[in-house]
Amino acid sequence: MNVEMDIIRRSNVKVWGSGSRTLLFAHGFGCDQNMWRFVTPAFENHFRIVTFDYVGCGKSDLTAYHPDRYANLNGYVQDVLEICRTLDLKNVIFVGHSVSSMIGLLASIKEPDRFERLILIGPSPCYINEPPDYVGGFERKDIEELLETMERNYIGWANFLAPVVMNRPDSPHLAEELTESFCSTDPYIAGRFARATFLSDNRRDLPFSRKPTLVMQCSEDLIAPLTVGDYLHRNLPNSRLVVLRATGHCPHLSAPDETIQVMTEYLGTPSLN
């Protein structure tokens, strides 16, 4: 098998749609590309759509997982760039959820010619508070306890955290789906990804981003509170901040219509309704 096909298989890459511009969708921690299923159909007549699973997630090739490579976000950045090289993608519109927001931002800094702009949904450059100037939403001890709980009782952790992350008590099936997604990931790999995510600090990288960026922040989000969206908007050159009516951390699942509307207005595409 050649290198190109190996990367396609490794990351379970899917390509469809039409149009000269490409939307590359990157899922968040504990998820896979299926999480985009309510959003991508709205764009497939105007864009080429690319989705994938990070190594260790979804239907990726688990044998390709190496702990050293994925000890921090750089391994996931390499996943994105290798997919871009394999498909010869340039001027991509990168759509990243949660931790993928910073993964995409880092990728665009490393190889800027491959990216046109960034759409960041629920992004955070640092999850840990650093008073008095930065409120990330968590104290360090909170993160350490979360990671320790994952190691002790992964299933219990998933069942507790998913409803909190989704924050849609009126739609329990969404929390159930997120719980199932968490539980379908190998606990060891999930734990490593969680450490790479929640202990990351990319605040110093923000000024190096030169791509037009849309920051989409939910109105009530435990994982990425409004203070984080404000911080990103202040420190990301050429950025636009939109605060959604949606609550929780996964508006592409819980409020896809609003997510599509904001993306459509930003991209300047015709009405997709």
Image: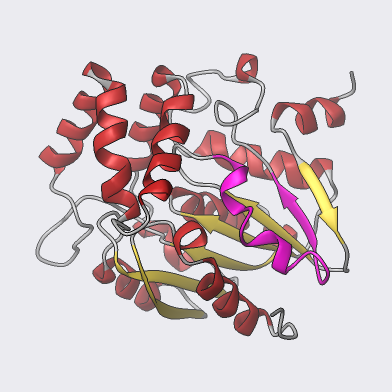
Residue 213 can be seen, yes or no: yes
Viewer-proximal residue, 99 or 172? 172
Where the C terminus falls, by quadrant?
bottom right
What's the coloring here?
secondary structure
Residue at image position (75%, 51%) is 50
Q: Quadrant of residue 224?
A: bottom left
209 sits to left or right of 204: right
Residue 223, given in percent of the width and then of the height, sits at 29, 54
Viewer-proximal residue, 80 or 165? 165
Where the N terminus falls, by quadrant?
top right
46 sits to left or right of 118: right
Residue at image position (81%, 68%) is 21
272 sits to left or right of 103: right
Residue at image position (31%, 75%) is 230
Image vertical order of residue 219 relative to residue 65, above or below: below
Q: Which residues are magenta?
A: 32-51
Residue 242, given in percent of the width and then of the height, sits at 43, 80
Q: Is residue 43 magenta?
A: yes
128 sits to left or right of 56: left
